[in-house]
Amino acid sequence: MLCVGLPQNGYGPDGYNKFGVAEFLRPLQQTAALCSMGYLPPMWMHSAVAVDDATIARFADGDKSDARAAQRRIEAKASSLT
């Protein structure tokens, strides 16, 4: 899980950062590809600096279940390749 400080409109061509969050992660995706690693779709929370701990905890709990499901898909794919 990635927490970013700005709201969603802060990312993208018209936003403060000029690029979407996923675009900032492209070098990591390429590194994973070069190392023959699986790359899970990124998950992030906007405006993380402005939310309370309970909201972050709820978001993280949702991400954990999403990450576990993605891990099961990767493991199933890997076992089918052997």
Image: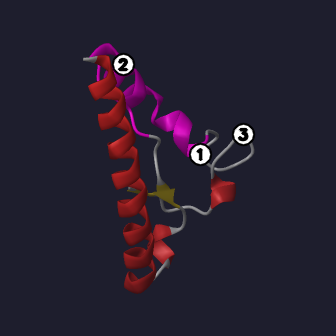
| Residue that numbered label 1 is attached to | 17
* Residue 37 counted in the magenta span: yes
Residue drawn at x 37%, y 83% as measured from the top left: 53
- As measured in the structure, the alpha-carbon distance from the residue carrying label 2 to the one carrying label 3 is 26 Å
In this image, 74 relative to 26: left or right? left
Please name the colour scheme applied to the rendered image: secondary structure
**Residue neighbourhood size for the residue with mark 3, other residues' Cα within 10 Å, grouped as few (<14), some (14–19), many (≥20):** few
Query: Which amino acid, by three-letter code, is at mark 3?
Result: Pro
Q: Is residue 80 above or below residue 7?
A: above
Query: Which amino acid, by three-letter code, is at mark 1?
Result: Asn
Q: For the residue labelled by badge 2, is the local secondary structure a helix, a strand or a loop?
A: helix
Q: So how many labels did they put on this image?
A: 3
Residue 69 or residue 10, whichever sits in front? 69
Residue drawn at x 54%, y 62% as measured from the top left: 46
The magenta-colored residue range is 20-40
Which quarter of the rendered picture does the N terminus lie within?
A: bottom left
Q: Main secondary structure of the magenta part?
A: helix
Per the rendering, the mark at residue 39 is none
Question: Where's residue 58, x and y in %?
Answer: 43, 77
Q: For the residue labelled by badge 1, is the local secondary structure a helix, a strand or a loop?
A: loop
Which is closer to the viewer, label 2 or label 3?
Answer: 2
Question: Where's residue 37, x and y in %?
Answer: 29, 24
| Residue that numbered label 2 is attached to | 33
Residue drawn at x 30%, y 26% as measured from the top left: 78
Query: Which amino acid, by three-letter code, is at mark 2?
Result: Ala
| Residue that numbered label 3 is attached to | 13
